[in-house]
Amino acid sequence: MERAKVGLADDAIAAVEYLATRGDVRRDCIGLVGFSEGASVAPIAASRTPRVSHLVLLAPEAVVGAVGALERHRLQTEREVGAEKELAEQKLLLSRLTLKLLLDGVQPPEIRRQLVETRQFPEDMIGRAIRRVSRAKNAYQYRYDPAPV
């Protein structure tokens, strides 16, 4: 689980624990509201304390994390490079390949080696893509799947 989300869940739990100490709050009726990213944090918090009686989840991510991440990257790249359509397409292809290899369990040094061997991308671009995609904070996000279990 992503460390940042666990930290946010810990903050939510602390707020719930505080509310439980107040005389003007019913201890059996403390809930959490999560919006956007909070809609994935609130269930983590609720699973770690019996004090949460209900959840309200608003606008959670509705696509697999890797798909959402690639779409955000596409929009950002298009803004950055503007009319340089070929460069934008190259960056997006590199991001897709890098992310696929990472999700398949390939480690960053091997990802670099495989991508350099293709001779499709400049090495500095490969390095930036690997750093961006392999950040620990993104690992949970890429594997997030909103499908019911």
Image: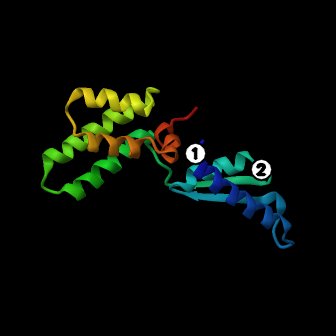
Q: In this rendering, does residue 145 appear at all?
A: no
Q: For mark 2, give the secondary structure.
A: loop
Q: For mark 1, give the secondary structure.
A: loop
Residue shown at 41% from the left, 32% from the top: 109
Q: Amino acid at mark 2?
A: Thr
Task: Give coordinates of residue 126: x percent, y percent.
Answer: 30, 40
Residue shown at 73% from the left, 64% from the top: 15
Circle 1 is placed at which residue position? 2
Q: Residue furthest bottom?
A: 24
Please state which of the two labelled residues, at mark 1 or mark 2, is closer to the viewer: 1
Q: In this rendering, does residue 86 appear at all?
A: yes
Task: Give coordinates of residue 136: x percent, y percent.
Answer: 51, 44
Q: Considering only order in the chain, which callout, 2 or 1, is on the residue closer to the N terminus?
A: 1
Q: Relative to 61, is 97 on the left or the right?
A: left
Q: Relative to 70, is 149 on the left or the right?
A: right
Residue shown at 39% from the left, 28% from the top: 110
Task: Give coordinates of residue 66: x percent, y percent.
Answer: 41, 39
Residue shown at 58% from the left, 31% from the top: 149
Task: Give coordinates of residue 130: x percent, y percent.
Answer: 37, 40
Circle 2 is placed at which residue position? 49
Report which quarter residue 63 is drawn in: top left
Q: Residues within 10 Å of mark 1 (few under 14, many from 20)?
A: few
